[in-house]
Image (cartoon, helix red, strand yellow):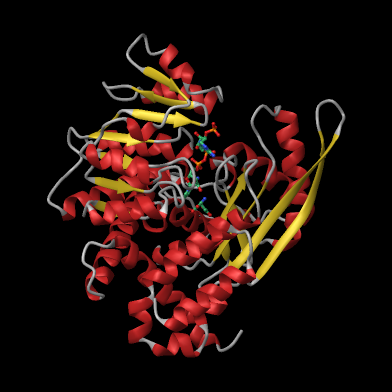
């Protein structure tokens, strides 16, 4: 990197000690921006990088709640309102025991550029809590969500900040959060949260959108190389919202998704995952992944504590969590004949893994491009809410597909323009950054 970019990065790292995931995300974006900065000195002159790496506002709050035994519990809540240059802060809420400031900031930072790439008017934000939903009762989940929203509600709104789901936050949690918001605000502000139920302002296709989008993005990368999904084996990690609907779209595109996982291990099903069974176990019963193998009549194998990337396959869709695919896993995958990776999760590949994929010249779609279909469809939900309208599944899915194709083409064209053909990382970072940076220049120093 140039001396000035290096110094800016150093300052960001020093100002945010111990926030490893945030450092990782900032480093990757800054490294991609070198070429852009040499062509556009106006960004450095206006200190855009220094400003973009500093959240506009960071909200950290206490979330007290009472468990089923009557014991008082305390968690920490976060909402990072990172950048509103292009629209209201927009991004999900994550409930997972690992959540801390550095994780929420990495997610919020990525969200700025992802949201910009969608072409829709949304800024970047992220939030969540170190609350662990595993093993909690329905009543505990509800009381936690209500307490979380009792503080969050004063900071959000349809034109201010619009949260949605992420790990540990799905339709059930959005219901409890929206119910409490509505009660406190005394308004039916449908556009304050996305991922809502279909009878109270939700959008068709939002549930499917992230996974569908990731598979569509992968398909566009394959097409660019003259290839397709037909008959190819696909490795999917995770078995939550993103994983399930990635598998669904892969199957529609003719691919054979053969794996799924959770934090206890993975399953391999060489005939192709039985999606109805997996959905029943994960979405309806909220069970564990070993139950899939147990109920598949000997067709699938469960590997407790195993690494899903040990399974041979041609296309990988990491859809669980950050840094789940490291350098060693990347080497194994490449040795086993990998041709493409599209990140359904946020930053699932470590920097070493990304370098190996790029050196091997396989198609690599970074999360901020490949998983943008979820937040894009959230923005479509906001549009429907603003117009008090609801669109058909077909119409909404067509819009999602067009957006994903457009993101793919924008990243490819930008990479080409900056002398790095096929480098979707550079393409996504430059294209996502430039739109936000230009808006910030227009606003003056704020
Ligand atoms: P879910 O909570 O629905 O599912 C998460 C899945 O990943 C579960 O199978 C979970 O297993 C597994 N997982 C989570 N954390 C870990 C961990 N530390 N180690 C091993 N396995 C883990 O979340 P989503 O599907 O919504 O999110 C998955 C990824 O996609 C995240 O990176 C998220 O940020 C990203 N994403 C989500 C979007 C959305 O619209 N939902 C949009 C864009 C990106 P277990 O149940 O055992 O914890
Ligand atoms: O990481 C993400 O893009 C999400 N969790 C979805 C955010 C949203 O506002 O729909």
Residue 300 appears in the rendering = yes
**Among the 4 quarters of the image, the one containing residue 445:** bottom right
Up the image or down, 43 lies above or below 251; here it is below
Specify whether 195 is left or right of 413: right
- The residue positioned 57% from the left and 48% from the top of the image is 201
Specify whether 106 is left or right of 43: right
Q: Which quadrant of the rendered structure holds the C terminus?
A: bottom right
Residue 233 in the image: state x and y as whole percent.
24, 32
Specify whether 189 is left or right of 231: right
Is 292 in front, or is 177?
A: 292
Residue 280 in the image: state x and y as whole percent.
47, 22
- The residue positioned 31% from the left and 67% from the top of the image is 427
Q: Residue furthest left?
A: 226
- The residue positioned 41% from the left and 19% from the top of the image is 302
Residue 372 appears in the rendering = no
Is 402 in front, or is 127?
A: 127
Up the image or down, 60 lies above or below 216; here it is below
Specify whether 270 is left or right of 367: left
- The residue positioned 40% from the left and 70% from the top of the image is 31
How many numbered circles are shown? 0
Up the image or down, 237 lies above or below 56; here it is above
């Amino acid at each position: 990197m140039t001396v000035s970019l290096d110094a800016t990065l150093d300052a960001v790292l020093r100002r945010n000690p111990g926030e490893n995931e945030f450092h990782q995300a900032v480093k990757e974006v800054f490294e991609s921006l070198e070429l852009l900065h040499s062509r556009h000195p106006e960004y450095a002159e206006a200190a855009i990088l220094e400003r973009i790496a500093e959240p506009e506002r960071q909200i950290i709050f206490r979330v007290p709640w009472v468990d089923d035994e009557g014991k008082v519990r305390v968690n920490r809540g976060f909402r990072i309102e990172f950048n509103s240059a292009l629209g209201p802060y927009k991004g999900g809420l994550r409930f997972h025991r690992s959540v801390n400031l550095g994780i929420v900031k990495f997610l919020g930072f990525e969200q700025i550029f992802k949201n910009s790439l969608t072409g829709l008017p949304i800024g970047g934000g992220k939030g969540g809590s170190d609350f662990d939903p595993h093993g909690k009762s329905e009543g505990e989940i509800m009381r936690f969500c209500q307490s979380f929203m009792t503080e969050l509600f004063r900071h959000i709104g349809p034109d201010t900040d619009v949260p949605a789901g992420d790990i540990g936050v799905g339709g059930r949690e959005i219901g409890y959060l929206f119910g409490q918001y509505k009660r406190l605000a005394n308004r039916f502000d449908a556009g304050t949260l996305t991922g809502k139920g279909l009878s109270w302002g939700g959008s068709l296709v939002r549930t499917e959108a992230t996974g569908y989008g990731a598979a569509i993005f992968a398909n566009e990368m394959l097409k660019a190389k003259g290839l397709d999904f037909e008959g190819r084996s696909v490795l999917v990690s995770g078995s939550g919202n993103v994983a399930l609907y990635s598998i669904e779209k892969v199957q529609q595109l003719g691919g054979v998704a053969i794996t799924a996982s959770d934090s206890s291990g993975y399953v391999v099903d060489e005939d192709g995952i039985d999606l109805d069974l997996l959905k029943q176990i994960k979405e309806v019963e909220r069970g564990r992944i070993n139950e899939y193998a147990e109920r598949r009549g000997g067709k699938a194998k469960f590997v407790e504590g195993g690494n899903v990337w040990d399974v041979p396959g041609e296309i990988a869709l990491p859809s669980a969590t950050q840094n789940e695919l490291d350098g060693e896993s990347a080497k194994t995958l490449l040795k086993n004949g990998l041709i493409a990776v599209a990140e359904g999760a946020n930053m699932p590949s470590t920097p070493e893994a990304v370098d190996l994929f790029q050196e091997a010249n396989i198609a690599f779609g970074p999360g901020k491009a490949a998983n943008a279909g979820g937040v894009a469809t959230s923005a479509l939900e906001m549009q429907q809410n603003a117009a008090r309208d609801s669109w058909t599944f077909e119409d909404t899915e067509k819009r999602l597909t067009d957006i994903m194709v457009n993101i793919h083409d924008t990243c490819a064209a930008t990479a080409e323009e900056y002398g790095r053909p096929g480098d979707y990382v550079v393409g996504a970072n430059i294209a996502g950054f430039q739109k936000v940076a230009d808006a910030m220049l227009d606003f003056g120093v704020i």
